[in-house]
Image (spheres, rainbow, N blue to C red):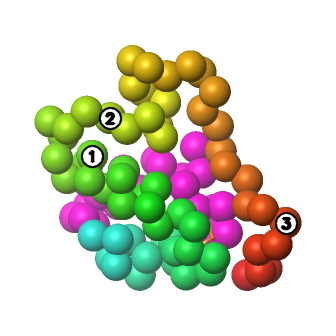
């Protein structure tokens, strides 16, 4: 699933970088450009990093793994009023 639509950064990219020691949103942005355009991905990326940094935390609904998930999880789409990067 894409975390950052503007820079095409997936959750797999984030997990791979986390395994290589990238544990902050700033470092993630430096490595991938995530958040450097519209910035709408930052809260979602921070949630994912928090989960990866604290594996005992319950997964958030944003990643579709919660027991309350209704299978409606998908990639959010930027609204039409976003600037082009
Ligand atoms: S979605 Fe990540 S910068 Fe726009």
Circle 3: element type: loop
Q: Nearer the viewer, residue 21 or 69?
A: 69
Which of the 4 quarters of the picture holds residue 28? bottom left
Residue at 44% across, 20% down:
68
Residue at 73% across, 61% down:
78
Of badges 3 and 1, the one in the foreground is: 3
Q: Position of residue 23 (x, y in %)?
A: 24, 65
Dot label at residue 51: 1
Mark earlier in primary sequence (3, 1):
1
Circle 1: element type: helix
Mark earlier in primary sequence (1, 2):
1
Q: What distance separates the C-alpha of mark 3 from that of mark 1?
A: 30 Å
Is 19 displayed left or right of 35 in the figure? Answer: left
Return the residue at label 3: 80
Q: Residues within 10 Å of mark 2 (few under 14, many from 20)?
A: some
Q: What distance separates the C-alpha of mark 1 from that of mark 2?
A: 7 Å
Are dots 3 and 1 in contact, CB under 8 Å?
A: no
Residue 16 visible in image: no
Cβ at disc 2 under 8 Å from ligand 1: no
Q: Which range is magenta?
A: 1-23
Return the residue at label 2: 59
Mark earlier in primary sequence (3, 2):
2
Query: Is 16 within the magenta?
Result: yes
Is 78 displayed left or right of 17 in the figure? Answer: right
């Amino acid at each position: 699933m894409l975390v950052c639509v503007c820079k095409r950064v997936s959750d797999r990219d984030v997990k791979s970088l986390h395994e290589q020691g990238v544990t902050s949103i700033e470092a993630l942005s430096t490595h991938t450009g995530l958040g450097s355009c519209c910035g709408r991905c930052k809260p979602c990326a921070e949630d994912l990093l928090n989960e990866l940094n604290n594996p005992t935390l319950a997964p958030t609904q944003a990643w579709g793994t919660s027991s309350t998930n209704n299978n409606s999880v998908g990639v959010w789409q930027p609204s039409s009023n976003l600037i082009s990067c």
